[in-house]
Image (cartoon, rainbow, N blue to C red):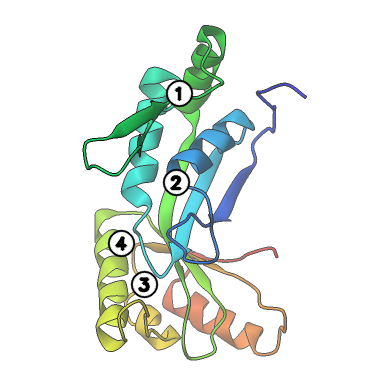
């Protein structure tokens, strides 16, 4: 298998980074680079009730488009604040960098949040399609964070459906499909043309 895999027009739309505590393990930068190296057309980053990884993912894509590979990681090395080391990427060779830059130019990055509800509703991945959509998503997450203890988020389907304009919504099917049709109907009525059922 080559270091650059052709994968066609595939894009994973339900990716979680290390900002989804105990559910995702990789840094947003690593997820973006891996998707590009695998030949994916894009990546959807949606962490659990947060948009914390969004800036790092976009920064990584911007750097990859310019440099070809992400710059070296700056890591702490020693006990003092100024003791750092730079770890170079072992894949850094000129031909590979050029191919990665070419692929990154057309790579699509979607960023949003995986909404985990406390009312029994299956998870919904929300991707804003406009600035107003971003405002609605971040207000929803802020509302949920204010209602709950630190580190938790209390939102229900009713909160999302109160104002879903500007959001693209993917309903993630649960293990038990009981009640799924009702949830899909409510979502479709509130956000016509902006609701999809994910594949598990």
Give the quarter of the image for residue 40: top right
Q: Is residue 1 left or right of residue 103?
A: right
Q: Answer with mark 2 or mark 3, whichever residue precedes in sequence.
A: 2
Q: Answer with mark 4 or mark 2, whichever residue precedes in sequence.
A: 2
Dot 2: within a 10 Å radius of its alpha carbon, few (fewer than 14), some, or many (20 or more) residues?
many
Q: Is residue 142 above or below residue 27?
A: below
Marker disc for residue 122: none
- Mark-to-mark CA distance, 1 and 2: 17 Å
Q: Is residue 161 left or right of residue 42?
A: left
Of residues 159 and 192, which is closer to you in this image? Answer: 159
Q: Position of residue 29 (x, y in %)?
A: 44, 40
Residue under circle 4?
133
Give the quarter of the image for residue 168: bottom left
Q: Answer with mark 3 or mark 4, whichever residue precedes in sequence.
A: 4
Q: Answer with mark 1 or mark 2, whichever residue precedes in sequence.
A: 2
Q: Does any portion of residue 41 appear in the rendered image?
A: no
Could you tell me which residue is drawn at 48 percent across and 91 percent down? 119
- Mark-to-mark CA distance, 2 and 3: 26 Å
Q: Quadrant of the C terminus?
A: bottom right
Q: Position of residue 185 (x, y in %)?
A: 56, 82
Mark 4, mark 1: which one is toward the viewer? 1
- Mark-to-mark CA distance, 3 and 4: 8 Å
Give the quarter of the image for residue 166: bottom left
Residue under circle 2?
28
Q: Are marks 1 and 2 in contact (CB under 8 Å)?
A: no
Q: Is residue 148 above or below residue 53?
A: below
Residue under circle 3?
164
Could you tell me which residue is drawn at 37 percent across and 65 percent down? 50
């Amino acid at each position: 298998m080559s270091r650059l895999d052709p994968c066609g027009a595939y894009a994973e739309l339900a990716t979680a980074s290390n900002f989804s505590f105990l559910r995702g393990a990789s840094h947003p930068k690593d997820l973006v680079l891996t998707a590009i190296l695998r030949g994916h057309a894009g990546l959807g980053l949606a962490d659990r009730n947060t948009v914390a990884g969004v800036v790092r993912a976009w920064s990584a894509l911007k750097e990859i488009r310019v440099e070809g590979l992400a710059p070296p990681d700056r890591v702490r090395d020693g006990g003092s604040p100024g003791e750092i080391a730079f770890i170079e990427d072992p894949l850094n060779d000129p031909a590979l960098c050029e191919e990665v830059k070419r692929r990154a130019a057309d790579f699509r990055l979607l960023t949003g949040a995986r909404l985990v509800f406390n009312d029994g509703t299956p998870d919904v991945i929300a991707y804003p399609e406009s600035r107003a959509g971003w405002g609605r998503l971040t207000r929803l997450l802020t509302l949920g964070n204010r209602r709950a203890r630190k580190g938790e988020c209390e939102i229900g389907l009713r909160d999302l459906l109160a104002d879903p304009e500007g959001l693209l919504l993917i309903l993630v099917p649960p293990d038990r499909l009981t009640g799924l049709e009702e949830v899909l109907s409510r979502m479709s009525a509130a956000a016509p043309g902006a609701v999809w059922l994910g594949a598990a």
